[in-house]
Amino acid sequence: MNHIFGPVNSRRLGRSLGIDLLPRKVCNLNCIYCEVGATTQLTCERKEYIPTTAIIAEITEFCADPERLNRVDVVTVTASGEPTLHSGLGRIITALKTMTGKPVAVLTNGTTLMREDVVAELSLADVVIPSLDTARPASFRKLNRPATCLDLQEIIEGLVHFSKVFTKELWLEILFAQGINDSDEEVQALVAVIRRMTLSRVQLNTVARPPLESFALPVGEQRLKEIADLISSGPDAPRVDILTSGSSATDKVNPVDSGRFPGGATNREETLEKIIEMLKRRPCTAADIDRTCQMGGPEKVEQFLEPLVRSGQLKKQSHGDKLYYQ
Ligand code: SF4
């Protein structure tokens, strides 16, 4: 399996090369809005789900081509699940920093920061982007559907502690789902946690791509703006960004191996392989696919994929005002 993908243009991070640390959907949450699909292994166990040496070997191979490396602004450690569950995280971040010379960002669901080993390993990164969607246990169960080993208060204390000891960029991401965590009471509980944290910024998100559960509904832009105002008011409040168009933790990197297909594939099979790799991980619009595969516009992508849709190999699903391939 290839564990390196991209780079793709990320509005938040620039040209981002992704490192996927897990072989399948291993997570300690099973969020109703997940774009990756249902969690196949709901666990809190931290171990080497993929040999660390195999991932480092891929990084070494990627770095052997300086041209490829030049197209990368940042390396993003992520996973088809929760990357901090991989016990080789620290070694991988160290290898990435040494071999690429690029800043390293880590996306995490923020649930393992009560662990000193995770704190020490994440401290090696330049940017850490944890999530916290709610500070209320009932909503946490409803929205994030945690493994039984997780306790929300412990998670919050871990996040607060990490924010005090981590000296680099810390961006907290909050995803709001209509009717679950978007009420004033919910926001006030989150604000109380945010006030205890030292954050570089807070990023607000909502359900945008086809979610795991159809009852995961987006929150309107007006409500997101009101929430942003609540969070950003008061002295020492962090900067708050609203991530529109559904950019999220998993949005920053699409799993396409640009190492094998630099500058956009010209071969039909290669292009198809790239697209299928993208769609295996998350639903994408024609515009998403075109951004990575450079096929000459979303219409060209649609033409290219139409036979696969007709034959039933791909599905088209509308969500919001967009059409997604799955
Ligand atoms: S959204 Fe992230 S944390 Fe939630 S189930 Fe999916 S991979 Fe796990």
Image (cartoon, rainbow, N blue to C red):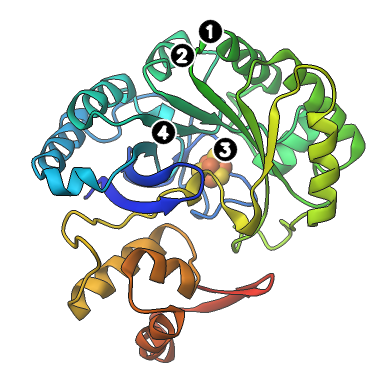
Residue type at the position of mark 4: Pro
Residue extending furthest toward the right? 184
Mark 3 C-beta to ligand 1 under 8 Å = yes
The one nearer the camera, 258 or 3, is 258
Question: What crowding class fits label 1: few (fewer than 14 Cα within 10 Å), some (14-19), or many (20 or more)?
Answer: few
Residue at x-position 52% and y-position 52%: 38
Q: Can residue 269 be seen here?
A: yes
Mark 2 touches mark 1? (CB < 8 Å): yes
The one nearer the camera, 124 or 313, is 124
Image quadrant, ligand 1: top right
The one nearer the camera, 150 or 81, is 81
Work out whether 72 lies above or below 168.
Answer: below
Residue at x-position 33% and y-position 76%: 295
| Residue 75 % position (x, y) | 33, 37
Q: Earlier in the sequence, mark 3 or mark 1?
A: 3
| Residue 190 % position (x, y) | 78, 28
Q: What's the mark number on residue 7?
A: none
Work out whether 189 lies above or below 267.
Answer: above
Per the image, label 2 sits on a secondary structure element best described as helix
Q: Earlier in the sequence, mark 2 or mark 1?
A: 2
Residue type at the position of mark 1: Val
Residue tagged by mark 4? Answer: 83
Residue type at the position of mark 2: Val
Residue tagged by mark 2? Answer: 119
Residue tagged by mark 3? Answer: 29
Residue tagged by mark 1? Answer: 165
